[in-house]
Amino acid sequence: MNVIASLIVNIKLQSQIINFINESLQSLLWQGFKRIPLKGNTTFAT
C-alpha cells in the first residue's frame, strides 16, 4: 500500500505542477494578448 500511496502522491504533485505551469503560461499569454488592440468583439474568457 505504501508504494501505491506514494505513486498517488507523486501523480497529484505532478498534476499540481502542470496546472501551475499552465496557469502561469495562460496568464502571460493573456497579458500579452490584452496589449494587442482589438476591433469588434472582445468577449474572451479570462
Image (spheres, rainbow, N blue to C red):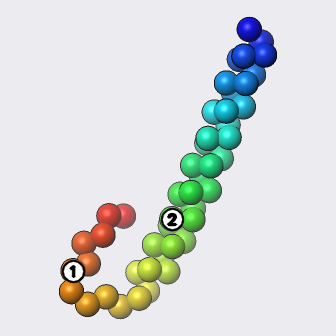
Q: Quadrant of the C terminus?
A: bottom left
Q: Indicate left or right for 10 with 19 as reference.
A: right
Q: Is residue 14 above or below residue 37?
A: above
Which kind of residue does numbered mark 2 sit on?
Gln
Kind of residue sitting beneath label 1: Asn
What residue lies at 75% left-to-right and 22% top-to-bottom?
Answer: 6
Q: With respect to residue 22, does 1 lie above or below?
A: above
Q: Which residue carries the number 2 mark?
A: 26
Direction top: furthest residue: 1
- Identify the residue position indicated by label 1 in the image: 41
Residue name at image x 26 percent, y 78 percent: 42
Q: Position of residue 35 (x, y in %)?
A: 43, 86
Reading the chain from its start, which is encountered first: label 1 or label 2?
A: 2
Mark number, residue 28: none
Location of residue 14 in the rendering, given as x and y in whole percent from the top left corner:
68, 40
Label 1: element kind: loop
